[in-house]
Structures are given as C-alpha cells and as structure tokens.
Amino acid sequence: QKEVEQNSGPLSVPEGAIASLNCTYSDRGSQSFFWYRQYSGKSPELIMSIYSNGDKEDGRFTAQLNKASQYVSLLIRDSQPSDSATYLCAVKAGAQKLVFGQGTRLTINP
Amino acid sequence: DGGITQSPKYLFRKEGQNVTLSCEQNLNHDAMYWYRQDPGQGLRLIYYSQIVNDFQKGDIAEGYSVSREKKESFPLTVTSAQKNPTAFYLCASSTRQPSGANVLTFGAGSRLTVL
C-alpha cells in the first residue's frame, strides 16, 4: 500500500461547480497535511494546510480532515478555468519528511 | 525578494556523464530538499538536509549525491550510476512553523534530459 494515495484522474468539472479531491494515507500517526497546486511544467505551490480534524476554509478552498478514517480532502467552490491543474496531497512523515501522493489532474470546463 | 533559485532550468546530458544541479535559497531556511518528479507522478524524495554539513538519504538516493557546505546552497549531482535520470528535479526549503509543521517552498525546477 502506498503511503499517500490519490485518484490520478483526470477529474473534469464544469465551471462554477464544486470540485472534490480526495486523499488517503497509511500512517495513522501523521499530524500535518497539505494540498499543493501544480500547473503544467511549473513547481508546486502550497494552497492549504490542515492539522486538526474537521474543516478549514480559505476563500473558495476548504480542506477536510478525518484522522479516524485517514482521509483528507480538498473542495474547490465556484470552480474557475484557472483552477485547472494537478493537485498534490502531502503528508508529514517523521520530523522532516513530506510524502506526496501521485496527484489528481483537474480540468474545469468553461 | 526571498526565494529559491534553481539552475539550469533545462539540461541535456549524454549517458555516462555526471551533472550537477544548483539550488540556492535566501530565505534563511534551515532545511533543504531535493525531489524528483516523473511525468504523471508525484514527488519522490532524493535527499534532504536539516543543517549545514549534514544530510540524509530519501527514498530514491541511489545514483545521486549532495553536499551542504553553506546554509544557502544544496547542490545535487546526478551521477552516471543513476540508470534513468530523465526527470523534473525540484529543490525545496522549509522552516518550522509555530504549529510545528514544516511548510515547503519550491524552486522553479530543473528539467534533465539524457540523450
């Protein structure tokens, strides 16, 4: 079993709809969780971090964490074409190590 | 402006050659990392360093070497022992947040192609 798993997609969502991205992880002791956005040919950029169970909202983005189910998700409301990118889930493993999922490619259709 | 500078952006190498990728940061971050990304894949950790003159192997260190002689610099050498070096290489740095987590900041990346 991979340490961090994501559906590679592609996930296609109409403009204005809610995009839902999911991630599961294997290390029950993980405490820190991150979502990065990566445009094609570019480096990843951090869009959300979450450390406690529940929801965390930042503008159109909401991160949801359920440690009992070892599940973290990212919701994007009012999806825009500029949201089209690959979204990487990352989980902190150990003192300094961050483990990434394979990423979900999201396409927003105008 | 603070940030991470990687060079070169594109690099072509013949088989059997060693190449060195540069990574410099002026963020005053203690920790630095090298990741490799293959098409359609996530990031895999090659090496990381928490302090000067110290570094640890990541998940795919074979065929790579690093040094950390200065806080600002963490160069990666791709040796001829690396059998499949064509990839996108990302350097990152981090500092500990008040929450205790380490948030990564990435450079723009170096794309290595072996001819």
Image (cartoon, coloured by chain):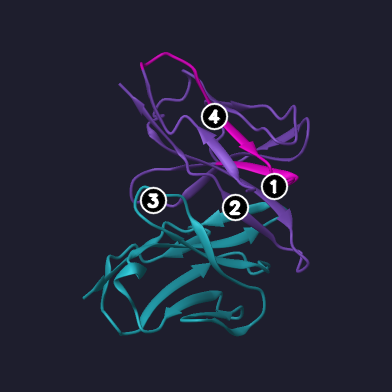
Chain colours: A cyan, B purple
Q: What is the span of residues highlighted in magenta in the rendered image?
A: B14-34
* Amino acid residing under circle 1: Leu
Say which element carries label 2. strand
Q: Which residue is mark 1?
A: B27
Say which element carries label 3. loop
Apparent side of residue B114 relative to residue A57 in the rendered image (left or right): left
* Amino acid residing under circle 3: Gln
Q: Which residue is mark 3?
A: B41
Q: CA distance from mark 3 to mark 1?
A: 28 Å
Which label is found at residue B62? 4
Q: Nearer the viewer, residue A102 or A28?
A: A102
Say which element carries label 4. loop
In the picture shown, does residue A15 fall above or below A1?
below
| Residue contact between numbered discs 1 and 4, judged by CB atoms under 8 Å | no
Image coordinates of residue A23 in percent, x first then y, are 47, 70
Chain identity of mark 4: B
Q: Nearer the viewer, residue B83 or B9?
A: B9
* The stretch drawn in magenta includes residue A69: no
Image coordinates of residue A66 in percent, x first then y, are 58, 81
Q: CA distance from mark 1 to mark 4?
A: 29 Å
Q: Residue at x 46, y 81 (%)?
A: A60
